[in-house]
Image (tube, rainbow, N blue to C red):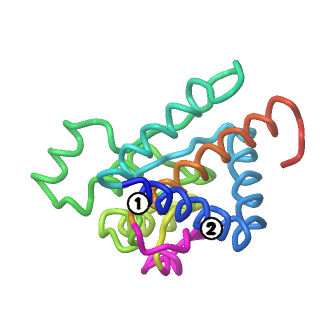
Amino acid sequence: MENIILKRFKESSEVKTRFLKENLPKLLDVIKLISHTFEAGNKLFFFGNGGSAAEAQHLAAEFVNRYVMDRPPLPAIALTTDTSILTSVSNDFAFNEIFAKQLRALGKEGDVAIGITTSGSSPNVIKAFEVAKEMGIKTVALTGNDGGIIVKMVDFPLVVPSTSTPRIQEAHILIGHILCEMVEHSLFFKVNP
């Protein structure tokens, strides 16, 4: 049992280190994008399925409430939380429309849509990115494996180099936390990320 625990910690650390080496400039670009989005009075949308839905809610809460400092709330919305919208759209249209319809209703040009999908191939995330592009909403994907279909669709693909869903999810939450912390610094300490 101890060997398995040690192996999992090592794997997680290696995946995160490799992601950072391969994506630091892109990560800095996303921090700037989100900071400018908030400065312009626009919003941030998060969405994903399963564990990624939980991460979407977690990260939206960090922006709206606080991450490491007390500061004014920032407009972030998780499109995974309204069960009436999710079930009515799924029932009346299709499950792949659940995020796209919400983006059409709530989003506008200048906003940012962050889709979280470990495979990079979730149909409802793909559909939401298609709608975002039509609307002039900038797109960021937190994904894994080889990035899937989504890697070619979005403005900023942040691909975690792993085929292990747990390792990808662990990296995604770290990436989300870094985004929150650096945006806070950028907006409220006036430090260039």
**Vertical relation: 42 (above or below) 153:** above
Image x and y of residue 107, in percent: 48, 48
Q: Secondary structure at mark 2?
A: strand
Image x and y of residue 28, in percent: 77, 58
Q: 10 Å neighbourhood of mark 1: few (<14), some, or many (≥20)? A: few
Q: Nearer the viewer, residue 24 or 111?
A: 24
Q: Nearer the viewer, residue 102 or 17?
A: 17
**Vertical relation: 163 (above or below) 166:** below
What segment is highlighted magenta in the picture? Answer: 146-164
**Amino acid type shown at disc 2:** Phe
Residue occupying image coordinates x 58% and y 41%: 43
Q: Is residue 40 left or right of residue 67?
A: right
Residue occupying image coordinates x 41% and y 51%: 47
**Amino acid type shown at disc 1:** Ile
**Vertical relation: 53 (above or below) 151:** above
Q: Quadrant of the N terminus?
A: bottom left
Q: Tell me if residue 67 is in the magenta stretch.
A: no
Q: Secondary structure at mark 1?
A: helix
* Label 2 to label 1: alpha-carbon separation: 34 Å
Extreme-top residue of the structure: 70
Image x and y of residue 112, in percent: 58, 52
Q: Which residue is mark 2?
A: 156
Q: Is residue 7 left or right of residue 99?
A: right
Extreme-front residue of the structure: 2
Number of numbered discs present?
A: 2
Residue occupying image coordinates x 62% and y 31%: 74
Residue occupying image coordinates x 75% and y 61%: 29
Which circle, 2 or 1, is nearer the viewer? 1
Which of the numbered marks, if any, corresponds to residue 4? Answer: 1
